[in-house]
Amino acid sequence: MADEFKQSRPNSRLPVLTPGHTFATVTDKISELVLTARTPRFWWIGFGVSFLLLQVMLISVAYLFAVGVGVWGINIPVGWGFAIINFIWWIGIGHAGTLISAILLLMRQNWRTSINRFAEAMTLFAVANAGLYPLLHLGRPWFAYYIFPYPNTMSLWPQFRSPLVWDMFAIATYATVSALFWYIGLIPDLATLRDRAGSNFGRHVYGMLAMGWRGSAIHWHRYQNAYFLMAALATPLVVSVHSIVGLDFAVSLIPGWHSTILPPYFVAGAVFSGFAMVMNLAILLRRFYRLEDFITLRHLDNMAKVMLAMGLFVAYGYLMENFTGWYSSDQYERFIYADRFTGVYGPAMWALMFHNVLVPQLFWFRRVRRSIPLLFLVAILINIGMWLERFMIVITSLHRDFLPSSWHIYIPTFWDWALFIGTLGLFFTMLFLFIRFLPVISIFEMRELVAEQEAHDE
Amino acid sequence: MMSKPRRIYDDQGRRIFGLMAEYDSSQAILQAVDLAYEKGYRKMDAYSPFPVEGLSEALGHRPGKLALVVLGGGIVGALVGYGMQYYASVIDYPLNVGGRPLHSWPMFIPITFEMTILFAAFAAVLGMFALNGLPQPYHPVFNVENFELATRSHFFLVIEVEDPWYDPEETLRFLEGTGATQVSEVPF
């Protein structure tokens, strides 16, 4: 029976989990990474570099607060510079985590098991960065709370008809739900760490976080119910979040933005770039922590296929966007789409076509999907390409609006770059801390996978 | 302390919670639970390192109300979200923008949706905790040394002394006959 199954699906020859593992070995291997007293040298190096970059971010933010948003390259009419580009880029990266943990769970794709935990962590840290940007972009960030609907002495309410207010609700809900989902996913593993921690301190901290989890069958039953329901809630949520980000643009009247294609095309782009980031992180993790047994070529192969599909979605988005611009017969729309390819930012547009449309086509070839250096390289290129895409959307439409007298070029300044690089520092600092103190792979789901495999073999 | 008729103490006079049997596979514990249920035991619980399909049903647990709690949370969230926007835009601060309707319901949908998800998610997590009685800082099963394997590789069945069919010797014999690798008392 098992052999027939394998023959009918050639890909299933690549295992999701290298055979030979038992409940005990997967538990020990993964919890060992956290509970070991020795911190590996590469961790210190990686953490050190990230922490230094984090200081770059803190300095950039301090300088921004002291002087004002004038330190950035933004001007009139290009009021949305790096802050909004990076906001969209980060939140897009986050979306892959939710997609992997929620949508693939509902579709019973068991290969998600060894990558969902760190993908979810990636979501949280990416959303933290994304959430910072609009705040920093406010100009008067100390009034950020004005956007919250609270009864105040000014008798004012936020404008609920504005996508920017929707955005606040979407991002806040997304961050909260992602954190809850991540935490309940962690509880059984925290219990494992509690029971296996050598130090008294570790036992207490993990014990408190595990809330007294003891693996009762009835608890598991409700737990799984809750977990599936959360996944079912997170799935439409993730679509809504990037759609609302798309609406920030689509609801405006700016040429190149005022288009109904933006919400779905933003969602596809988000998943595309997010998977690229998960791919990069997965390759580094399995390499440095020797997790090749758990994150197998099957995972990388599947992720490459998802990226290929998403890349085609995105390419279709580019095609339709340009077609609608032309078909509208609106001279401003036609101008902006031509200007994207031929104007001052033309080279960036061609680069983005190369990164997002041409390069992912390599994933049609199995040899590329199974070659780790190529996978890593393509994923990096896609990350850059997706950043360029947001750059093109935000900047080109703004820098050439309706009146030539108000045209202006946007050039990012040193502080734009410093803050962007700094947010990478924040992201990786949090990621390194997560890797050191929490299990990077969901242990109980790996045990479930072992049980499934045993049942399958029989 | 209320006195309970079937409270049982061990040789040293320590109060015990029940008898714990240990198994090394999910099939073994499923079988043991089925046998115990057949025998009439009801006050029992099984512990496993991962969710074992059918185990809670075998213990006689009926599918719970969590889904209803989540549905309730979602409905409350939708009402709160929509109500907040309606109150702010129509009642408390009506703002005439080019003569457009104050009750512009399509524009209220995105926030209503987000609030629905937010409340439903909180209902799912808090509801699961509440029904499971977590956080629970202390539970007698942790007094058994081997129980730390419940989060690693082993499966446990505990029959509590509160069960009407519980009998120190009878139950011990029964558990030993279910394929358990080890049976031990659970002290309070």
Image: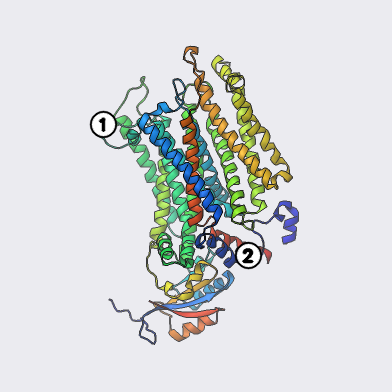
Q: Which residue is mark 1?
A: A155
Q: How many marks?
A: 2
Instruction: Please report whichever mark, 2 or 1, sits nearer to the chain's N-terminal start.
Output: 2
Question: Against A30, is A243 above or below?
Answer: above
Question: Against A291, is B152 above or below?
Answer: below
Give the chain letter at badge 2.
A
Q: Which residue sits at x=33%, y=34%?
A: A142
Q: Position of residue A381 (x, y in %)?
A: 62, 37
| Mark 1: secondary structure | loop
Label 2 vs label 1, nearer the camera:
2
**Residue A21: mark:** 2
- Report the quarter where the N terminus of chain A lies: bottom right
What is the three-letter code of the residue carrying label 2?
A: His
Quarter of the image for residue A264 reads top right
| Mark 2: secondary structure | loop
What is the three-letter code of the residue carrying label 1?
A: Ser
Q: Position of residue B131 (x, y in %)?
A: 40, 60
